[in-house]
Structures are given as C-alpha cells and as structure tokens.
Image (cartoon, coloured by chain):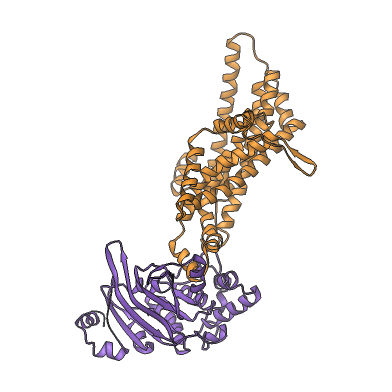
Chain colours: A orange, B purple
Amino acid sequence: MANSIRAFGTRRATLAGFLLVLLFSLAACSSQSRGGAYHFQWDITFTSIFQPNGSIINGLWLTIGISIVAQLLGVGLGIIAALGRMSRVWPFRIVANFYIWFFRGTPLIVQLTFLFYGLLISKVLVWPSIEIGPFVIAAEVFAGTLILGINEGAYMAEIVRAGILAVDPGQTEAAKSLGMNYRQTMTRIVLPQAARVIIPPLGNEFNNMIKNTSLLYVLAVFELYTTFESYSTTSFHYFEYFVACCFWYLLLTTLWAFVQGWLERRFARGTLPTPDAGGPNLRERLLGQRGPGAGGADAIGGH
Amino acid sequence: MSTNAISHDLLGAIGGVPRPDVDVVVDARDVNKWFGRLHVLKDVCLQVKRQEVVVIIGPSGSGKTTFIRCVNHLEKIQSGRIFVNGHLIGYREAGANKVVEDKEKNIARQRMEIGMVFQRFNLFPHMTALENIIEAPIQVRGMSRDEAVATGRALLERVGLAAKEKVYPNQLSGGQQQRIAIARALAMKPALMLFDEPTSALDPEMIGEVLEVMKELAREGMTMIVVSHEMGFAREVANRVVMMDDGVVVEEGTPDQVFSSPTQERTKTFLSKIL
C-alpha cells in the first residue's frame, strides 16, 4: 500500500516536471522563430523568490492582509445575509436577496471600478484613508478590501445558508424546548454544526480570495500582482517575474490548504468515532484524496 | 455495577421535585390544529394535575405527537387555549376573545419550565454528554458553570452514565443517548416533562433502561405526559391513559379501565391489535 502511494506521488511529480520543460521549450522556440533568441535572465526569478526586495515583501503582506480581512468580512456578511434570506420578516428577505442578486450578478472588476472611482469622482462617497496608530491604510486599500469583502459576502451567504439547512431541524427543536432564544439557538447550536459543512467550500472561497486580490490592480493597490506587473512593464522581463509571481501565490494557497485541514479536523468534533480522525491529512491534501478506486488504478499503473 | 445502574433520587440531583404553583399543570381547552387542510386536532381537551403521569396512546396519525408538541408551542394551534402552570402557552390575549402569538422571548421563558424528550434524542452532536446537560442551565438559566457542572455530574451519575461525561453522543448507544437527553431536560428543573415516543427509535434491549429512568421519575413525583406504545409502562406508572384517534380524545381513564374494560369500539380494536 505504501508502495503504491509513493508511486502515485512520483508519477505526479514527473508529469509536472515534464509539463514545465515543455512550457519552457515552447517559450524558447517561439522567441527564436521571430529571430533573435530571447535571453532568460533567471537571476531575476531567483532573486524575486529567494531575496525578495521590500516592494515584493510589502506586496505579499498586502495580499495576505487584504485577503484575510476581506474574507472575515465576507463570512460575517454571509451569515447575516443568510439569516436575512431565511428570516420570517419580509423586509430582511428583500434586502438580503437584493444584496446577493447584485453582488453575484455583476463582475468583481466592475464593482471595484464603479464603487471606488464611480463614487469617488461623483463625490457620492469620498473614500477616506484610515489611521490605526502608526499605520495608515490608504483609501484605495481600504475601499478595495471593503468591496472584496462585500462581494465575498454574497457568495458566502449561499454557502452559510446551505450549511444551516444541512443541520437537522431536531437540533433547533431541542434547543427551543430547553428555552433557548433565536440568538442562542443559532450561535450555540446551529452555526457550530453548520460550520463543518461550510468549511470545505469556504476553503475554495478563500483560495479564490487570495487570487482575486490581484484585481485591486485597477485601484493601483500595490499588492503582489501589481508589484510584479510594474516590474515587468518597465523591464519587459514578464516571463522571469511572473514565474516568481506564481511561486508566491502558490505558496500562499498551499499554506492555506494546511490551515483548512486543521479547521476541518477542529469542527469535525463529535461527528467521527475517533476524535482525531477527521479531515484529510497532509499527504491526502497534497496528493488528493484517495478513494477506493484510486488505489486499484495505481497498483496497476505503478508496477 | 454501581457506575451504570440507575439510582434512586433522580430529582435529588436538581434539588427535589420542582413544584409548580398550581394544581392543574396542563389545561388544554378545545385545541384545534390544521396542517393545511388536514384537521389533525379536533377540540382536544386534557387536564394534567400536579404529579400526575398521563400516557397518550393511539394509532399513528392520531395526533398524539402533534398534541404534545403544541404543549410547548413547537406547533402553532389555530383555536383553543393551552395553559401550563396557569399561563397561556405561545399566545397572549388580544381582547375580544382573540389571541396573537407571543413574543419569542416570552415563549422561550415558558419553555424553560417544560422539559421535552424526543423520539430521536436530538442531543447536540458537537458537545460531550456533560456539555449537552450544562448548556441550557448556563445559557438560559444563567447558572454558574461550577453549579451547572455539579448538577450535570449528579444527573449523569443518577442515570447511570457517570463514566460517559466526556463522550460525544455518536459514541453512545441509543439507550445511553436517550438517558442523557432526559438528564439534559431535567437539568432545567422543569415543572413538567413531555416524552414524545421516547423508546420508539431504540433497539429492543435498550428500551428497558430508558423506561427505568422514566418510572423512577414518575415514582418521585414528576408531572409527565408520555406519548408511548409501551403498554407495560402505562399499566405500571400511568395515573391516566388517554386514547386518541383521528385527532379526537376517544377515551380516557385509569390504565385498568382503558386496558381491561374499554368502553369505545375504537379503543377495543386498537388494543386488540397491539396487545
């Protein structure tokens, strides 16, 4: 069994390596076909990965910070909007439905441009910069994070609603019969159980969020993408810089995968016969979950 | 042996028999309920006195579960009145013999006094046995954590599950889960306990341990309404048996009257099928 798992991993690595070589040769060929070979300056890539300068580090922290704050905002708004959609009070339903309809129905880049430049230039809302102690959050960072969070809330609303609907109605009845009110029933009984169902899609959402921060390019927020883009335009070394750019995004999304695995185990309490068996482990997370079919196919392919 | 035996003095764990202020704990008057066009309760009247154990029997679909759920307002009613401890349940008078549904806060307060045990246990799966029991006393009654834990442990011990304190519900058998569900309801010190077919979802060998807890409660003077098909239990502990069919109370009387000499034809056919 251990053998087949190793074979599984090796094969994947080989495939990835093969594709990378193919990509590089294609790039090299096409540049030569136009006459005048392109000289890859790999030191740019290596420096951007192993000795990143202040701008790159700054961009990295901005991407991380904006993603986390926007996602937290999105989860909060998502819970409120989900409860609004399921409310017995019809004005709540109308407002929640409109919110979800608008922010899921228009592109994020349109929302960013409209809500930042549109409101700013028409002076409907002059976005302020925020001072927190010694730190100043620029207006475009503040606005960008807020808009990303509001957009995210519309998607989270449906995920949270699905999670709540997945909880056995008997749980609500038991809570009510013990004298719990709506707030206690939701926060103590229903949402903690819904969380288990919400976390896998939430993992997807946050993964998207990390990447979607790159759209703040349109607001000239110098996060990871904008930083690399600006270096590329001035030096024309797109290829070298963007290999490094991919590296940083992959690092963030990979780290998140570990955090998600931990969260899944944390919220699986009481749902599995042994308390610590929940959620995929490290190997499963990297190589994909192995169903009963996968082992069989490997055994044939690997030997 | 002593660790998992059901001990006497269950109510001692919560400071003795909770005393309702009134002699008639439940007073249901002309209760009517419809599910859409289906008339499920038809002018149901039922009184339960203090420390009385009433067992409701009847075929499925007769409205007995619906009725018991109306008593703590898990179901709305369309006409009639249900009083528990002298207070109108789920509604407030709005003049001219009309009622409107009460505020959520008030309904929650009324439910504190009414314990309910469900057919499917409905324990909170993300909490351990002890956490299940102490949750409502802390959150709803505002009891200190130490006091709630002490009460919870005493209750667990008396339903014979002291060793299962830190165990999650899905690691317990159905009978154990139901005993914890009873302990959870008792921890709120209710004046009335409602049991909705508490043994119907259990494997046969586990029914006994749950009935044992219920019998002990009855002996100690808890006021109870039990929807059940356990005729042996009804015979042994019920003060009164109520036969329902098609949303109507067909017959009621002592277990002896109802089981040995039923007056209604419907009761006779029902009993002949199950006894």
A217 relative position to A19: left or right: right
- Above or below, comparing residue A60 to residue B146 in the picture: above
**Observer able to see residue B73:** yes
- Above or below, comparing residue B86 to residue A230 in the picture: below
- Above or below, comparing residue B183 to residue A97 in the picture: below
**Observer able to see residue B227:** no
Q: Nearer the viewer, residue B195 or A82?
A: A82
Q: Residue B16 in the image: x percent, y percent?
A: 55, 87
**Residue farthest to the front?**
B96
- Quadrant location, the C terminus of chain B: bottom left
Q: Nearer the viewer, residue A204 or A131?
A: A131
Q: Residue A1 in the image: x percent, y percent?
A: 52, 49
**Residue farthest to the top?**
A35
**Residue visible at 51% across and 42% down in the picture:** A99
B241 relative position to A303: left or right: left
Numbered label tally = 0
Q: Residue B162 in the image: x percent, y percent?
A: 56, 78
**Residue visible at 47% across and 76% down in the picture:** B114
**Residue visible at 56% across and 38% down in the picture:** A208
Q: Residue A128 in the image: x percent, y percent?
A: 70, 37
